[in-house]
Image (cartoon, rainbow, N blue to C red):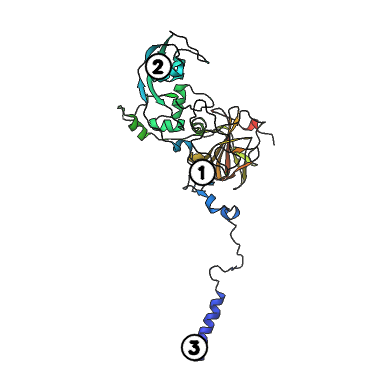
Amino acid sequence: MAVKRMAPVALLLLAACIPQRGTAYEEPGYRPAPPSRQDRYPQPQQERWERPALGNEQDVRRLPAPPPAWQARKVQADSRVISGRTYTVQPGDSLRSISGKTGAGSEAIARANNIPSPFVIRVGQKLVIPGGRYHLVRDGETGIAIAVAYGVAWSRIIAVNDLEEPYILRTGQRLLIPDDAIPPSGRPETIEQRAARFHLDLGVDDIVTGGQPAIAEKAKPAAPTASSARILSPTTPVAAPARLAGGFQWPLKGNVVKRFGPGASGERNDGIKIATPLDTPVLASADGVVAYVGSDIPALGGLVILRHGDGWTTVYGHAGQLLVQRGQAVKKGQMIALSGNSGFADRPELHFEIRQGRTPVDPLPRLPAR
């Protein structure tokens, strides 16, 4: 009977020795887990944004932001097919007014008649009006959105319209839409059918040349914002610096693990890859304006693109956290992201590019020796 009376007491003493949930308890050799990235870099709940898992199951966090410019205003594929003909210049005519009368693009008319800038025409002059399918650009539309609406690569639209830096579309501009795409079936198809099967495979070049919203003829792009707290509408064109201020600096310290140019297996690297620990600050390589921030190119994961003036652009990929907003002005050495292994990276690294216009150039000769 004495043993039975003592059993509840023994059980209570034994339970006191068992660690309960929430109680610190260490066995010999126990080492607590290191703090998570979330613990080391806490963010207010309202300022955290998470994207579905990318190529390597890593989330890319960033400040809250509107959708990319090419998703903000959907383009209606309401182009007009214009037959080629001749037009006699009337008093008061300009290439712009002739474009409105005929439905052809003013730039296309100038090219067809070898009319150089400033595009002077004379009364009685006979002009060739080039036929084709023309899209009238509306306020806020982007090149990428137009390409998606018609199911044709944006690079093809650039080529047939002879577009040049800085690739900003103008409201009221008429773009010639390539109509030579051959469907897999070999049978004719409507624009809607072609657009339905079109897959948007975005590249850095597309964002650099086709990601800016169209602007009215005499309007000026908005001035960049001073901080990430003020978010510009995705349909607002943003002014880039006119000139590159000084040279470029390294975006972070680390070993270059992949160089610019073709790789051993035939793939081409448009920049360099720099190995670095997770959450290393990524710094702006020069003064500039954020042209893009997001993760719409799966291979590059978290991505920031900066414009610097004189046609120069820098690209920062594989980021784990994005710290700036589109339209934000940044200074050389300012932190714009934290490094990660998002996208198709198999280790923590930074993909870094320098571009002159549409052309990627080797960053190493343009960075300080170290």
Nearest to the eye among marks 1 and 3: give it. Answer: 1
Is the residue 52 above or below the residue 31 in the image?
A: above
Disc 1 to disc 2: CB gap under 8 Å: no
Q: Residue furthest bottom?
A: 1
Expressed as whole percent of the image width and height from the top left, the position of residue 201 reads 44, 35
Whether residue 58 is visible, yes or no, is no
Is the residue 370 above or below the residue 242 in the image?
A: below
Residue at 63 percent across and 32 percent down: it is 364
The Cα–Cα distance between marks 2 and 3, rounded to whole angstroms, is 105 Å
Whether residue 80 is visible, yes or no, is yes
* Location of mark 1 (residue): 65
Query: In the drawing, what numbered circle is on residue 143?
Result: none
Marks 1 and 3, the one that precedes in the sequence: 3
Expressed as whole percent of the image width and height from the top left, the position of residue 355 reads 57, 30
Q: Secondary structure at mark 3?
A: helix
Q: Is residue 312 left or right of residue 102?
A: right
Q: Is residue 191 left or right of residue 333?
A: left
The Cα–Cα distance between marks 1 and 3, rounded to whole angstroms, is 68 Å
Which image quadrant: the C terminus? top right
Q: Residue furthest front?
A: 92
Is the residue 177 above or below the residue 333 in the image?
A: above
Near mark 3 (Cα within 10 A), the count class, few <14, some 14-19 or many ≥20, is few
Marks 2 and 3, the one that precedes in the sequence: 3
Q: Secondary structure at mark 2?
A: loop
Near mark 1 (Cα within 10 A), the count class, few <14, some 14-19 or many ≥20, is some
Quadrant of residue 90 within the rendered picture: top left
Nearest to the eye among marks 2 and 3: give it. Answer: 2
* Location of mark 3 (residue): 4
The Cα–Cα distance between marks 1 and 2, rounded to whole angstroms, is 42 Å
The amino acid type of the residue labelled 3 equals Lys
Q: Residue furthest left?
A: 187
Residue in the foreground of this view, choosing between 178 and 170 = 170
